[in-house]
Image (spheres, rainbow, N blue to C red):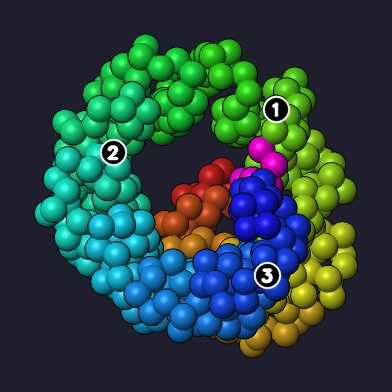
Amino acid sequence: MLEQGETLAGEGLVEDALSRFEQALTLAPEEPEVIEAVGRALLGLERLEEAEASFMDALELDPGWAAPRMGLAALSMRRDEPFKVVHHLERAIEADPEDSEAYVELGRYYGAMDEPGLARATFERWMHGHPEDADMLINAGLTAFDTGDYAQALEFLEGALETATDPQQVSGARTFWANTLDMLGRYPEAVTAYEEVIRGTPDWWEAHANLGICHARNAHPEEAEAALRRGLKECPGSPEIRDELAAHLLHERGGKDELREALSLAEEAVALGGEEVRHLYTLGEVRLALEDEGGAARAYESVLAIDPRDPGAHLELGLLDERRGEVSGAEQHFMEALKGDPANPRALYSYASLYYATEELEAAEELLMRALAADPEYAPALSALASIRARHGDYEASLEYLEKAVSAGESDAEHFMNSMEFLPLRDNPRFRTLLSRMGPES
């Protein structure tokens, strides 16, 4: 029963796996391995309190076993309890110091918590006794990359390239090394590194996708498209390359023919990629570009079917509701978006726009100030505050906000020229100068 449950869990059939584990539990109610398996299945089903009880029961029966500690650490991550995460992972390391999994989880967790020094120290604890472990060096490099410490990432990844023997390890390390070279501004070296990977393993989709991204980041859109199309030819089953190419056609080309191709690619990526949220976002963006608001909404609703709390999907659905005049629906989605991402300036600005439209300027201004606290150069919030100050007759403050907005990229001169609240500033030299900096005056 236990083996059947593990097989089902590996196939993503968690409910069926739990049924097998529970049957095993009736046969061996005091077996820690069975109790821990029940806990893992319950965790996969988000039944957190029951999962915690199972892990604690397994730990009570076998206090020196690392697996229940790993389960409790994963549960604490879901609950956003960092001290418990660290505690359980450290206890797992104590229980089995020769198992690298807990070191990887702890190092990656420190990286996610923006503690690069602790992340590095965790990886180095393992590598002190296992200096040839290429997988750990790769994980250390990826963690440093994710925290923006590209010089440190390069050092770890170069170490991985020196020690790796498995061809897949080598391809992975070289691809991530190329990513790091790109972020360090070493574009030609990065391209050479990607091409080297592709020559050796042409079916390694990550190298093709990242080469396309690298070309695009360095303002070479034609080379980016060529790299992605070559990648699709070499890796015809890759949803990731389809997604990248669809996004490229959407943002770099944008014509009707390109958008139709992008839609086809995005739909294929979703079909091939299972529950990969990123592909659904691309599909939503393409459908919106094709003015298919219903199709875009269905894509974002599919994201929420996977993760009901996804803040990005709530934001996009809120914007669609706002566009359709469904204010209550928009407000609900904006609130949900801010629950998951309370400092998102776009969500704060979008929520503020609802209050602005109903003349509730004080509530709108409070949200806009929160947006600026998160991003002081967020141009839409600066422009909206300029409008609110102008409506209050505080033209000096309005011009201050407007100047900051122009410096941050505001370019809609026609809007400010024609808005009633700025009518008293029509002949103001400073106002006219700001309009000229946005573009030709109306």
Q: Per the image, is 264 magenta?
A: no
Where 36 falls versus 163 (above or below)? below
Based on the displayed image, in which of its 4 quarters is residue 284 positioned?
top right
In this view, the mark in front (2 or 3): 3
Kindly tell me whether residue 86 is visible in this rendering: no
Q: Is residue 41 left or right of residue 145?
A: right
Q: Where does label 3 land, which residue?
A: 27
Q: Position of residue 261 (x, y in %)?
A: 73, 23
Rounded to the nearest angstrom, the CA distance separating label 1 from label 2 is 28 Å
Q: Which residues are magenta?
A: 273-278
Mark 3–mark 1 contact, CB under 8 Å? no
Comes first in the chain, label 1 or label 2: 2
Residue drawn 14% across the image and 45% down it: 131
Q: Position of residue 125 (x, y in %)?
A: 17, 60
Residue drawn 46% across the image and 84% down it: 60
Q: Where does label 1 land, which residue?
A: 265
Comes first in the chain, label 2 or label 3: 3
In this view, the mark in front (3 or 1): 3
Badge 2 density bin: few <14, some 14–19, many ≥20, Cα 10 Å: many
Residue drawn 44% across the image and 66% down it: 67
Q: Position of residue 292 (x, y in %)?
A: 84, 42
Residue drawn 74% across the image and 70% down it: 333
Q: Secondary structure at mark 1?
A: helix
Q: Which of the two residues, 228 or 429, is positioned nearer the viewer here?
A: 228
Badge 1 density bin: few <14, some 14–19, many ≥20, Cα 10 Å: many
Comes first in the chain, label 3 or label 1: 3
Rounded to the nearest angstrom, the CA distance separating label 2 from label 3 is 52 Å
Q: Where does label 2 land, which residue?
A: 180
